[in-house]
Amino acid sequence: MFKKSLLLGSTALLLAACGDAATDDTSEENTGVDEEETTEETIDDTAEDAGEDVVIEVASHLPPMTDVVEIADEVIEDGYTVELVEVSDNIQYNEAVLNGEVDASFAQHEPFMEMFNAERDGNLVAIQPIYNAIVGFYSPVYDSIDDIEEGAEVAIPSDPTNEARALMILADYDLITLTEGVGFDATVDDVQENPYDFTFTTIDLLNLSSAYQDGVELVFNYPTYIEAVDLTPEDAVFLEDDQGFTFAQQLVVREDNQDSDAIQALHAAFTSQEVYDFLEELAENGHLEPSFDVND
């Protein structure tokens, strides 16, 4: 398994995060990447001519997502090697796929990808849900939902799709009421009724565990992140019920390379028995549930 890190400039990250008109950052002139040279067909031909494995680069950033990438490398068919490209935040992996710096990413759910496409006029596609992370709300103060008091501070993610996800969970438990008809675009401004008089604080997804440590009464979080403070979904005050796998972690590629032989081989490796068995072990701990049938 090859492994490398991808670093981008902080200014470029800020522009991308804000959805600003940063299209110049992805131009051929600024990136030195010729779009025609980044197609999987060109990569396949070059590797085959040299008698080497085709290297498929997949951007990811945290376990168990990175673990899945590594397992995919172990089981992918002969002639291919999967290279894990480690990134440090929730922006780099999409920019890298869009710019042709990597071939795929495994780090997000489809609503988050669709938000990126809308902001960046992107052509990313989600080709396979892999697992659904069991998210919920945690508290250093409350042991159950019945203990929640009026005036509590509620920490939710600052990115739009996860903010909406957190608010929809609160609404499902009748802790708030959202404006009728809102969905993945819901924000705190759409809170129509707030019977507990919650104070909402939006925080970067990667910093929500720190909010828990700082004593915020209710904190939305993923099992991967909350594990940093020695908690599991069993410790949550309440959990999401997402039976439709709307927010399942997806294998994401570009529209122009999704039908290539390399991506088809990657897809088969990601939906292998070995990946499924690994996810099933994690499912026993309540962290997630697989969202595919083996080689379906």
Image (cartoon, rainbow, N blue to C red):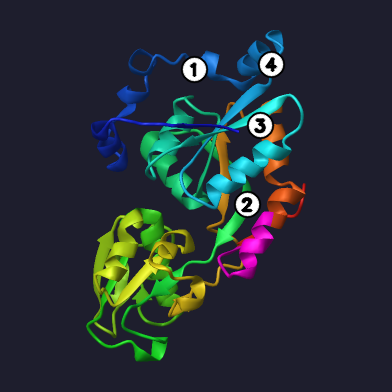
| Callout 4 crowding tier (Cα within 10 Å): few <14, some 14–19, many ≥20 | few
Q: Amino acid at mark 1?
A: Glu
In the rendered structure, which amino acid carries the disc numbered 4? Glu
- Residue stretch in magenta: 278-288
Residue 234: x and y, percent?
Answer: 51, 76
Location of mark 1 (residue): 35
- Please state which of residues 51 and 91 is positioned toward the viewer in this rendering: 51
Instruction: Check disc 2 and give the amino acid type.
Output: Ile
Residue 130 marker: 2
In the rendered structure, which disc, 2 or 4, sits on the residue that comes first in sequence? 4
Q: Is residue 64 left or right of residue 235?
A: right
Q: Residue at x 71, y 33 (%)?
A: 265
Q: Tell me the SS state at disc 1.
A: helix
Q: Decide: marks 1, 2 in contact (CB < 8 A)? A: no
- Mark found first going from the N terminus, 4 or 1: 1
Q: Is residue 139 left or right of residue 98?
A: left
Residue 292 visible somewhere in the drawing: no
CB atoms of marks 2 and 3 within 8 Å = no
Q: Is residue 280 magenta?
A: yes
Mark 4 highlights which residue? 52
CA gap, disc 3 to disc 1?
17 Å
Q: State which quarter of the image contains the N terminus.
A: top right
